[in-house]
Amino acid sequence: MRCNSHPDVETTLRCGKCGKPICPRCLVQTPVGTRCRECARLRKLPTFQVSAKHYLAAAGAGLGTAIATGIVWGVAGWFLAAFLSIGLNLILAPAVGYTIGNVISLSVNHRRGTGLAILAGFCVAISFLVAILFPWGLSFNPAYFLSSILNLVAVAIGVFAAVSRLR
């Protein structure tokens, strides 16, 4: 016999469902025996099947949450700047990242995926931009090298918190 997908390969294996000849490269081991790829119907888990509708819902929820948390982040930084200065961002960024990741996860019924994780990371960056760009915002001065580095580290920690929630 010759493999149905690879005619140059001789085989003695057959699909357990349809009976087509298959070679070792084509076979899929399932709980009920060996199958060809068509009969095995390899699919992603429903948790990782994200449609365009889910991405739209996640983008809306993520953007809304990013703006809201950015405002809270900026106001908290403005009120507490005298007490905590730069260390505040290292505390608030992971909380903002976790919040954004959790809201996106809830908006898509706890689905996960790389696209959702990337979206959450962008939303954390947007939240930080909202926090520093509005008049009440954080004091972000690029002239202060150390504060700029610590702010970037804080945003990276926030992105990590959001991404790890959706992977």
Image: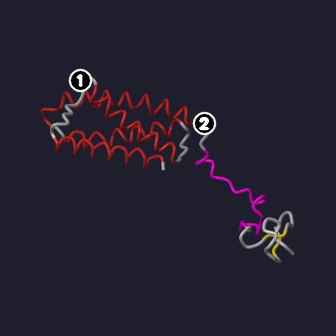
Number of numbered discs visible in the structure rendering: 2
Q: Which amino acid does label 1 sit on?
A: Trp
Give the residue drawn at x 84%, y 70%.
21
Between residue 136 and residue 7, name the one nearer to us: 7
Residue at 86 percent of width and 63 percent of height: 18
Label 2 neighbour load within 10 Å: few <14, some 14-19, many 20+: few
Give the percent coordinates (x, y) of residue 14: 83, 71
Query: Which circle's residue, 2 or 1, is located before the other in the chain?
Result: 2
Residue 106 in picture, x, y percent from top left? 50, 38
Instruction: Indicate left or right for 52 with 26 as reference.
Output: left
Identify the disc placed on residue 52: 2
Q: In which quarter of the image is residue 154?
A: top left
**As displayed, is residue 6 above or below residue 65?**
below
Per the rendered image, the range of residues in magenta is 28-49
Magenta stretch containing residue 30, yes or no? yes
Instruction: For mark 2, give the secondary structure.
Output: helix
Q: How far apart are marks 2 and 1 (CA)?
A: 36 Å
Tell me the kind of residue under disc 2: Ala
Q: Quadrant of residue 76?
A: top left
Residue 32 location, x and y as percent? 76, 67
Q: Using residue 157 as the reference point, say whether residue 23 is left or right of it.
A: right
* The label number, if any, that marks residue 136 in the structure image: 1
Q: In this view, does 149 lie above or below 33?
A: above
Point out residue 141 in the picture as x, y percentages from the top left corner.
Answer: 18, 34
